Amino acid sequence: MAQAPTVIMTQAGFVHALQNSNWQTSLCICFSDFGVCLCWTFCFTRLGCQVAADMNECCLCGTTVVKRTLYRTRYGIPGSLCDDYMATLFCPVCSVCQIKRDINRRRAVNTF
């Protein structure tokens, strides 16, 4: 007799994805963190690379919707792919600044 095939019901994921949380700051308060604001003002590309390095991702991917979605899912932040797409399409600067502020605040409380 042939055995029934093994079916995997769950996949391995990030530990952080199990914890539900929210963004530490809203999307449109870019000036609440002076350091991030200065970095954005003088060198947006560098800010994107800093975010990528913080996430252990490739800097060449830029400030894409994929990076925002990856960060959001790692930390269980509610939202959708459509929300991420709209944020990066209409306000890419605010989107990257929000991620960087979130990283900085999570680091301050040792949850990053």
Image: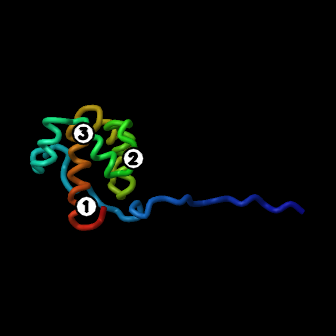
Check residue 57 in the rendering and tell me which mark sits there, or answer none. Answer: 2
Check if mark 3's residue and mark 2's residue have beta carbons within 8 Å: no
**In what element is the residue under mark 1?**
helix
View extreme (top): residue: 90
- Cα separation, mark 3 vs mark 1, equals 20 Å
As shown in the figure, which amino acid type bears the numbered disc 2? Glu
Q: Which residue is rendered at x = 39% and y = 42% of the image?
A: 58
- Cα separation, mark 3 vs mark 2, equals 14 Å
Give whichever of discs 3 and 1 has the lower sequence position: 3
- Please identify the quarter of the rendering in which residue 103 is found: bottom left
Q: Position of residue 7 (x, y in %)?
A: 68, 59
- Cα separation, mark 2 vs mark 1, equals 18 Å
Q: Which residue is rendered at x = 90% and y = 63% of the image?
A: 1
As shown in the figure, which amino acid type bears the numbered disc 3? Arg
Tag in front: 3 or 1:
3
Name the quarter where the C terminus is drawn.
Answer: bottom left
In the depicted view, which residue is nearer to us: 76 or 46?
A: 46
View extreme (right): residue: 1
User: Label 1: which residue?
Assistant: 106
Local crowd size for mark 1, using a 10 Å CA cut-off: few (<14), some (14–19), many (≥20): some
View extreme (bottom): residue: 110
